[in-house]
């Protein structure tokens, strides 16, 4: 995972030359809990866009947040599931571990809430491409 490494100065998402964007979702909220090492970057709920590539998920924050982008490669994501609560938006949850030189340390649980829909489609495609990469 990498913190603030996957966005351009203009606020766009940055991917490698060998990558492509498979799916994009707007109006997504990212929040963290159970962090082993506390950091101001991870406080509160982040609002923005979520991108899926063949190797990772990239969250791009909207607005002026200390966290502008957060990248989660599939090999560092564990226990991921799609949740469908009765009275709120569907979401994806899991845990992510830090990578050496990624801008933070430790591990954390994450929650991606899809306020405008798309959690199931995004999650199913994510599971499919993550499995292909193994």
Image (cartoon, rainbow, N blue to C red):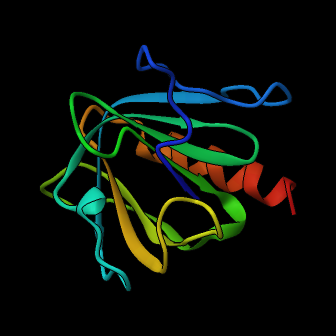
Q: What is the tally of numbered marks visible in this picture?
A: 0
Q: Quadrant where the C terminus lies?
A: bottom right
Instruction: State which quadrant residue 75 falls in.
Output: bottom right
58 sits left or right of 109 in the view: right
Q: Is residue 4 above or below residue 97?
A: above
> Closest to the observer: 92 or 12?
12
Q: Quadrant where the N terminus lies?
A: bottom right
Where's residue 6, x and y in %? Answer: 56, 36
> Closest to the observer: 42 or 78?
42
Where's residue 133, x and y in %? Answer: 85, 55
131 sits left or right of 113 in the view: right
94 sits left or right of 71 in the view: left
Instruction: State which quadrant residue 114 falls in.
Output: top left
**Residue appearing at x 29%, y 76% in the figure:** 38
Q: Is residue 87 above or below residue 109?
A: above
**Residue appearing at x 51%, y 22% in the figure:** 8
Where's residue 60, x and y in %? Answer: 41, 35
**Residue appearing at x 68%, y 60% in the figure:** 74
């Amino acid at each position: 995972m990498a913190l603030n490494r996957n966005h351009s100065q203009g606020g766009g998402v940055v991917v490698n030359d060998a990558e492509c964007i498979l799916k994009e979702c707007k109006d997504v909220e990212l929040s963290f809990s159970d962090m082993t090492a506390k950091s101001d970057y991870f406080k509160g709920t982040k609002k923005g866009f979520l991108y899926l590539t063949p190797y990772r998920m990239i969250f791009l924050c909207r607005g002026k947040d200390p966290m502008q982008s957060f990248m989660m490669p599939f090999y560092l994501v564990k226990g991921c599931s799609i949740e469908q609560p009765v009275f709120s938006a569907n979401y994806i949850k899991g845990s992510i571990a830090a990578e050496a030189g990624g801008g933070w340390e430790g591990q954390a649980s994450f929650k991606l809430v899809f306020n405008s829909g798309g959690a199931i489609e995004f999650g199913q495609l994510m599971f499919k491409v993550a499995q292909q990469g193994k």
